[in-house]
Image (spheres, rainbow, N blue to C red):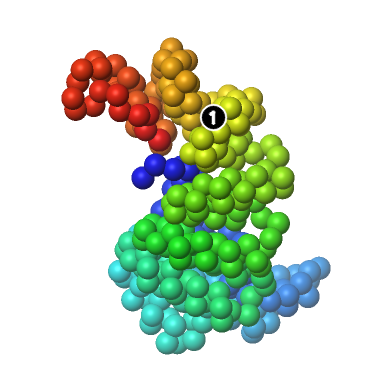
Amino acid sequence: MPGIPTRRRLRAARGLCAAVTSAVCVVLLSWPADGQGLLGQNPERAPAPPRAKANAARAEEYRKCMALARARPQDGFEAAIAWRSLGGGDAADHCAAAALFELEQYAEAAKRLERLAQVSKEEPAVKAGLYDQAGQAWLLEGRPEDATRAFSSAIGLKPGDPDLLVDRAQAWAARKDYAAAEADLSAALNLAPSRSDVYALRASARRFLDRPDDALADANTALELDPGNPEALLERGILRRLADDDGGARADWLKILNAMPDSAAAGPARQNIENMDVKPGDAKTGGAPPRR
């Protein structure tokens, strides 16, 4: 689907918690402050308080569950449900959602994540992370309206996070509301003005808003900040092609293919070059617009 490219979807597709050290995952473990009392004591002589031992065991159970959810998601889901019945709490619920995500049951994963965010007593930043993950799952399910709602809930809990604004922009773009997407991306750049990826995304939104000069300015800014940004090169190539600068478009797309052949932008760049090389009389693909 044409629109703003998905910047964070690859991260989500690798798992809701790529590592259990991420903020959302760690706080769900409810680590106690009891261990601070052991500072300065001989660890061989000072046994850990029972609560600290219990939480350490719970943390290990969570790590095992998340690893299983990624490696063998069906087994991971069953393990999470069993653990939940034994008092696994929020951590078990989160592991079950992660397993469902890996099973590509995105709608059910999103529902569970939103429900967990609603009932959790964790800090707002943690609840925002759960809503954000739910939004990513809704996008993969092809339900951008639900994704927009989830991302908006996340932003309400953590309004100063540019990544959340970018994620909601992605949902707006999936709904073809490029004005709303552009507004969120502009807000994200006000918070993080050196983000080349966000400039590349806004270039795409502005192109769909028929603002080619502003879009080109954004693509160029992205490349000034990061000359090797494949999304910015892809977008600038599209803008050049639409302006009948075939040489400039080809140069941008070839740079992607030569320097970043495994990037997500490589496929559209290759297809755009092939379309550009088709003779105008070709009834199948002649005159095809550039692909995103």
Q: In this view, does 181 lie above or below 248?
A: below
Asked if residue 28 shows in the view, the reply is yes
Front position in the image: 147 or 17 = 147
Image location of residue 24, percent across then percent down: 58, 65
Q: How crowded is mark 1: few (under 14 residues within 10 Å), some or many (20 or more)?
A: many
Image location of residue 175, percent across then percent down: 44, 54
Q: Which image quarter holds the C terminus?
A: top left
Q: Residue at x 44, y 43 (%)?
A: 3
Front position in the image: 230 or 239 = 239
Q: Residue furthest right?
A: 40
Which residue matches tag 1?
212
Q: Which residue is drawn at 47% across and 20% down?
A: 243
Front position in the image: 4 or 78 = 4
Asked if residue 57 shows in the view, the reply is no
Image location of residue 148, percent across then percent down: 51, 61
Q: Residue at x 51, y 35 (%)?
A: 210
Q: Is residue 140 above or below residue 257?
A: below
Q: Which residue is drawn at 33% across and 61% down?
A: 104
**The quarter of the displayed image where residue 155 is located:** bottom right
